[in-house]
Amino acid sequence: MTNRLQLSGITKRYPGVVANSDVSLTVLPGSVHAVLGENGAGKSTLMKIIYGSVKPDEGTVMFNGQPVHIRNPQEARALGISMVFQHFSLFDTLTVAENVWLGLDKALTLPEVSASITAKAAEYGLDIDPSRPVHTLSVGEMQRVEIIRALLTRPQLLILDEPTSVLTPQAVEKLFVVLRLLAAQGCSILYISHKLHEIRELCDACTVLRGGKVTGVCDPRQESNASLSRLMIGAEPPALNVRELHAGAPVLEVSGLTLASDDPFGTHLVDIALTVRAGEVVGIAGVSGNGQSELLYCLSGEDTRAPAGSIRMGSSDVSRLSPGKRRALGLHFVPEERLGRGAVPTLSLAHNLLLSRNDALGAGGWIKVGALRKQAAEVIARYNVKANGPDAAAKSLSGGNLQKFIVGREIEAKPKLLIVSQPTWGVDVGAAAQIRGEILALRDAGCAVLVVSEELDELFEISDRLHVIAKGRLSPSLDRKDATIERIGEWMSGLWDDTENNNKETAHAAA
């Protein structure tokens, strides 16, 4: 059997780091082949080499038995290679259909492309409106566009970089059905994920990278999560220390928050009621695009149109306050978009600290550069961020390492209220365990924590209470011990009783 893809001796160097060192990889036709490694191990760089967006310094690439020099993604697509990136490659000002059209045969008309998108979206359970501008989409919806665009090219080799990071369990199951069908038809799939149970369930081969080098090849179906963790990071992730809840006074109280979205494609918020107390973690689950973004904009202060009195921190009405004034009251926020909102791409990690901390500012606003660099170095060290020092640009970090830095930056600011969106999106198992552990430690120190995540396992692991958001409405809160995957799944469709919601919130607020 001719190999679908064969890499030999691939090496790629960047200033200060060797991303790939003498990497060899073989993928068979119809194989679902995982590439596993911790953040910064070189996985994304290797995939970009295969896709033609990065040129290797050394090594050879063979596709269907023939040596190839893939100079750009267009050549890759012409060969039959498609890729879904972890960081999306979409034009914000264009519609979904126009973005997809850019990567397809120009003999197709835009209406034909729109019809194809609608058909594929329905077939795969990844519903999306082809006419919507990309800038109006949530992160989860952008992920759906990328997956649909790749599938429409009918690839021989499909590269997926963290494809399920913002999908619900039901959508993941549907995607796996599609991927197994593609593999059965002879399409090879290179699958990058930090979700070890996904790799064991879906993949028939696995290549492990550590520090840019291949450290092992295995059949993940014969491995356990623990053994895969040891191959990837040299150890098993530490168990979380979850103590009994001893919540204090309410820190965040939301009541009667009804607000029309200022985005024509957005989701209106309807009578949101929410309480987060000192020393507890409250989780919000839900399918992307159901009002999470609108709620977070209101809570962070990016949207100051909330009705007066609808959002309170302690005794303060913060409904109309700016993000800076809320930060002065102790609210810190980690957005789901790392680059652009969580960090300024071109600024150094040290200067990115200034987005939410001002303790390195002197009289007259002068920056104490030495103190700032020291603070950044401390965050880098404590959270094991792989970066070329405090002066490294934010955009130079892998997605998982940038996430660790941003979460660490906000935790180290010692907030009274921490709101985190998708805390471990695209983060390896070791780093995810560390971030979750830090969130729990912050909660144990008396901080009120609100976590919005599409990772149900994560919410079940760290939350004391759970809500579901659906169509702009918030479900009752459930104690973690009473929550089940089945019940949360039903609530994702909005199937709950509002009377129960009001009674539960009143009881928690009074407790």
Image: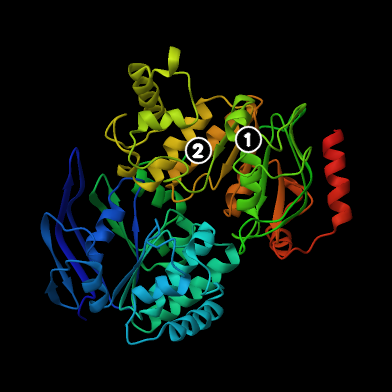
48 over 103 or under it: above or below:
above
Position in image of residue 303 (x %, y %): 63, 44
Label 1 packing within 10 angstroms: few (<14), some (14-19), many (20+)? some
Left or right: residue 299 compared with residue 368: right
Tell me the quarter of the picture where residue 173 sits.
bottom right
Depth check: 423 or 224 in front?
Answer: 423
Residue 239 at least partly seen: no
Position in image of residue 288 (x %, y %): 59, 59
Left or right: residue 96 compared with residue 395: right
Tell me the quarter of the picture where residue 122 sits.
bottom right
Depth check: 260 or 52 in front?
Answer: 260
443 over 397 or under it: above or below:
above
Residue 188 at least partly seen: yes
| Image quarter in which the C terminus is found | top right
The kind of residue on which mark 1 rests is: Val
The kind of residue on which mark 2 rests is: Ile
Q: Is disc 2 placed on a helix, strand or loop?
A: helix
> Distance from label 2 to label 1 (Cα)?
14 Å
Position in image of residue 47 (x %, y %): 28, 60
Residue most toward the front? 364
Q: Are marks 2 and 1 in contact (CB under 8 Å)?
A: no
- Numbered mark located on residue 136 in the image: none
134 over 326 or under it: above or below:
below
- Numbered mark located on residue 242 in the image: 1
Label 2 packing within 10 angstroms: few (<14), some (14-19), many (20+)? many
| Image quarter in which the N terminus is found | bottom left
Q: Is disc 1 placed on a helix, strand or loop?
A: loop
Label 2 belongs to which residue?
Answer: 435
Task: Give the mark, 2 or 1, whose residue is nearer the N terminus.
Answer: 1
Tell me the quarter of the picture where residue 313 sits.
top right
91 over 425 or under it: above or below:
below
Residue at 69% over, 34% down: 280
